[in-house]
């Protein structure tokens, strides 16, 4: 699933996810738009808020695979 879908499943706005995760609204928007691959640090901040494993989110999986 895409990050946007995971966020909406939790009924969170971009602003709410940003506030709860400590990741900027701009960064979340860029990830959702496919303009930026998140760092592992960013993934670790967002995934627990959404209650998902990082590999469940396409953008996170792509970032992890790029590092490996």
Image (cartoon, helix red, strand yellow):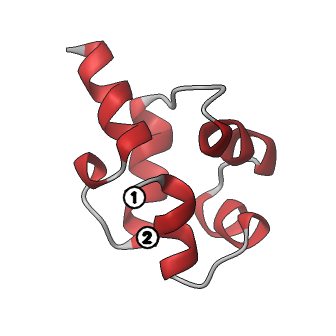
Q: Are marks 2 and 1 in contact (CB under 8 Å)?
A: yes
Q: Please tell me which residue is depicted at 43% across the width and 44% down the height of the picture.
A: 43
Look at the picture and state if 12 lies above or below 38. below
Q: Position of residue 49 (x, y in %)?
A: 46, 70
Q: Is residue 61 above or below residue 62?
A: below
**From mark 2 to mark 1, how far is it between C-alphas?**
5 Å
Residue at 64% in and 67% down = 17
Left/right of residue 47 with respect to residue 61 in the rendered view:
right
Q: What secondary structure is found at the residue carrying circle 1?
A: helix
Quadrant where the C terminus lies? Answer: top left
Residue found farthest to the left: 68
Horizontal side, residue 46 vs residue 32: left or right = left
Question: What's the residue at 78%, 66% (across, down)?
Answer: 15
Q: Position of residue 63 (x, y in %)?
A: 38, 26
Q: Residues within 10 Å of mark 2 (few under 14, many from 20)?
A: some
Residue 64 at x, y = what percent? 29, 27
In this view, 10 is above or below 6: below
Is 16 displayed left or right of 6 in the figure? right
Q: Say which residue label 2 marks.
A: 50
Asked whether, in this view, residue 28 is left or right of residue 21, the answer is right
Quarter of the image that includes the N terminus: bottom left
Which numbered disc covers residue 47?
A: 1
Q: Residue at x 34, y 28 (%)?
A: 62
């Amino acid at each position: 699933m895409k990050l946007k879908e995971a966020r909406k499943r939790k009924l969170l706005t971009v602003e709410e996810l940003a506030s709860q995760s400590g990741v900027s609204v701009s960064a979340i928007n860029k990830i959702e738009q496919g303009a930026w691959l998140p760092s592992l640090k960013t993934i670790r901040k967002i995934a627990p808020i959404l209650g998902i494993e990082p590999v469940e989110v396409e953008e996170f999986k792509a970032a992890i695979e790029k590092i490996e």
